[in-house]
Image (cartoon, rainbow, N blue to C red):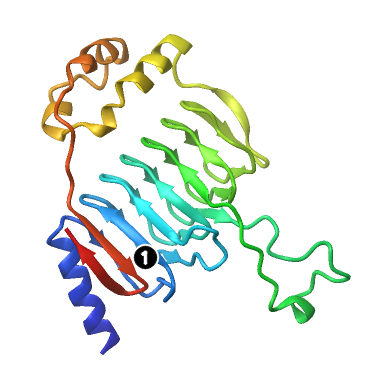
Amino acid sequence: MRLLVDYFLRMKAAKKHIRLSSLRGFAPKSSLKLEAYSRLGDVTVDQTQSAEPLLSVGAYSYVRSGSRLLSISEIGRYCSIGRNVTLGLNPRNHPLHWVSSSTQFSRHYQRKVTPLRIGHDVWIGDNAVVMAGINIGYGAVIGCNAVVTKDVLPYQIVAGNPAKPIRFRFNDEIIAALLRSTWWQYDRSQLDLLDFENVTHFATASRSLSQKACYSVIELQGRRITKSS
């Protein structure tokens, strides 16, 4: 019966151009707000330790199967998140200030944490772990197997355990221009006319963008759709 209910919920989401591979990993108290053209693989969503239980996922972003979405409040538009990624891991899910950190004594310990925020156009490689309470800037790249414990700046590439800066994708002038453009806010019909391969030309041409995007949205509480617009 549960499989049948999940099937109809996934079909309802698909009518809004939102693809959900499975709902079996959605904790009952988890809340999601998904924009059209977003995609979630077979993922775990459990925000019980987050200070902000609502997670919003932007248009054209995807999270591949095997990933866990924990204390995280936002995934921007056009984000690419790989397999077996952990987002919003609580750095203090065991009480280090108690006599013992063992769950034999601390099974009821819960510490609400500031959620992770991920900006637009972020790429996170397979098996990465990103801790709660930090911000990932627009256009950032996080390498495979990285463990991210600090904020990542816009268009910065980080990798390693713990993750360290490798370089920036572009120079300061281009980064400033791309941030000013806020291109992710605009309609795809306009974006498709721009040359994404030529960064310098794009930074100039994006000044002509005028039509903001307007996407349909669904909201879920656990495995139940509570709002569709």
Task: Note whether 99 is above or below 155 in the view shown.
Answer: below
SS at badge 1: loop
Residue 17 falls left or right of residue 75: left
Task: Write down the quadrant of residue 207 in the picture.
Answer: top left
Determine whether, in the image, residue 220 is placed left or right of residue 70.
left
| Residue 224 higher or lower than 128, as above or below | below
- Quadrant for the N terminus in the image: bottom left
Residue named by callout 1: 42
Q: Residues within 10 Å of mark 1 (few under 14, many from 20)?
A: some
Using the image as rendered, state which of residue 138 and residue 142 is in the foreground: 138
- Return the x and y of residue 93 as percentages of the image width and height: 68, 64
- As drawn, is 159 to the left or to the right of 38? right
Q: Locate the C terminus by quadrant.
A: bottom left
The answer to whether one can see residue 125 in this image is: no
Q: Amino acid at mark 1?
A: Asp
> Can you give x and y, in whole percent of width and height, for residue 176 in the image?
41, 15
Q: Residue furthest right?
A: 99
* Image x and y of residue 29, in percent: 44, 73
Percent position of residue 36, x then y: 20, 51
Residue shown at 16% from the left, 62% from the top: 14
For image coordinates 66% across by 69% down, the residue present is 110
For the point 73% across and 66% down, the residue is 94
Q: Quadrant of residue 159?
A: top right
Closest to the observer, 199 or 207: 207
